[in-house]
Amino acid sequence: MFVGEYRHLIDQKGRLAIPVKFRAKLAEGCVITRGLDSSLFIYTQKEWQKLADKLSQLPIGQAKARSFVRLMFSGAVDLELDKQGRIIIPAYLRDYAGVKTDVVICGLYSRIEIWDRKKWDEYKQESEKEATDIAEHLGDLGV
């Protein structure tokens, strides 16, 4: 399980050190792809396969389903950690998420999200303002 929030830097070559706490789970490789809300998603190979299986079952006749599948698969790249526990984020994914140097790495149970630090801080501030309303809605869903 991935949990926690970590602040890291991306170097000029697009390398990002993965938090030590997450490295063992990614030792056999991972997949990075476009995420939602201007973030990037990282999955273990096992979690990516589960998601890919679900996405492949979406109805091809529905435009929104096709769009989402394209977003996820066309941006996906297999990655391996280097000896220093870093990954190289391709330029097109850095551009998509607007990540330049300062980033936040968030552990979200079955995936990791990478955010531009400023965007994350803004998103988190807005979410914290709405925490009570969000919790109330989740209660309606049985959480």
Image (spheres, rainbow, N blue to C red):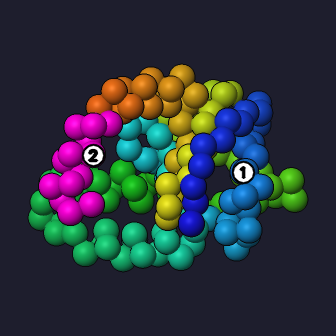
The disc placed on residue 135 is 2
Q: Position of residue 120 (x, y in %)?
A: 50, 31
Disc 1 on helix, strand or loop? loop
Measured Cα–Cα span from mark 2 to mark 1? 30 Å
Is 54 colored magenta in this rendering? no
Q: Residues within 10 Å of mark 1 (few under 14, many from 20)?
A: some
Magenta segment: does it hold 138?
A: yes
Q: Choose between 52 and 39: the one closer to the eye.
A: 39
Residue 18, labelled with which disc? 1
Q: Is residue 41 above or below residue 128?
A: below
Chain-order first, disc 2 or disc 1: 1
**Regarding mark 2 in the picture, which secondary structure is present there?**
helix
Q: Nearer the viewer, mark 2 or mark 1?
A: 2
Residue toward you, 16 or 108: 108
Which quadrant of the rendered structure holds the N terminus?
Answer: bottom right
Q: Residues within 10 Å of mark 2 (few under 14, many from 20)?
A: few
Give left or right: position of 45 versus 49. right
Q: Amino acid at mark 1?
A: Ile
Q: Left or right? Give the position of 16 relative to 61.
A: right
User: Residue placed at 42% from the left, 75% from the top?
Assistant: 50
Seen at 44% across and 31% down, the residue is 124
Residue 60 visible within the image: yes
Q: Is residue 82 above or below residue 103?
A: below
- Left or right: residue 46 versus residue 23 is left
Q: Residue at x 43, y 36 (%)?
A: 38
The region drawn magenta spans 131-143
Seen at 70% across and 73% down, the residue is 28
